[in-house]
Image: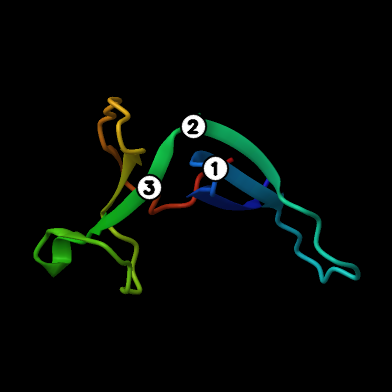
Amino acid sequence: RQAVVALGVDRAQRLVLRWTPYLHGRRLGPPPAPDESELLRGVERIEIAYWFAAAGGGWLPTWTRVELPDLVRFRLVFARGDRRRWPDIVAAPMREPSEE
């Protein structure tokens, strides 16, 4: 199913995934509250960067172009004093629709 999805860090320093089903019609009442899953605790912030090879390369902190980036990097920054270190997560956006 399609959904509206958001990944973020809340005030309690939790990395959370929120989603609501995507509806193709016009809603008559108020939208439902999103579902939420806690993924990780003790996260200060998440940094997202975008790589556009056609722009000469280099990671950009904002996505201002019309086309999809070639790569997207997710970096977790943990709370001060937390000794955990995670490698960056790098993903290539899907450029062609899947054949399901």
- The reply, left or right, for residue 54 in relation to residue 47 is left
Disc assigned to residue 34: none
Look at discs 3 and 1 and give the one toward the viewer: 1
What residue is at 25 percent from the left and 31 percent from the top? 87
Query: Image quadrant for the C terminus?
Result: top right
Q: CA distance from mark 2 to mark 1?
A: 8 Å
Extreme left residue here?
Answer: 56
What residue is at 28 percent from the left and 55 percent from the top? 49
What residue is at 49 percent from the left and 32 percent from the top? 41
**In the image, what residue type sits under mark 1?**
Ala
Look at discs 2 and 1 and give the one toward the viewer: 1
Residue 53: quarter of image: bottom left
**In the image, what residue type sits under mark 2?**
Arg
Q: Earlier in the sequence, mark 2 or mark 3?
A: 2
Image spot of residue 6 (x, y percent): 55, 52
Instruction: Please state which of residues 9 and 75 is positioned toward the viewer in this rendering.
Output: 9
Whether 66 is drawn above or below 99: the answer is: below
Disc assigned to residue 41: 2
Instruction: Please state which of residues 79 and 34 is positioned toward the viewer in this rendering.
Output: 79
* Contact? badges 2 and 1 (CB < 8 Å): yes
What residue is at 26 percent from the left and 54 percent from the top? 70
Instruction: Please state which of residues 86 and 93 is positioned toward the viewer in this rendering.
Output: 86
Mark 3 lies on residue: 46
Mark 1 lies on residue: 12
Q: What secondary structure is marked by label 3?
A: strand
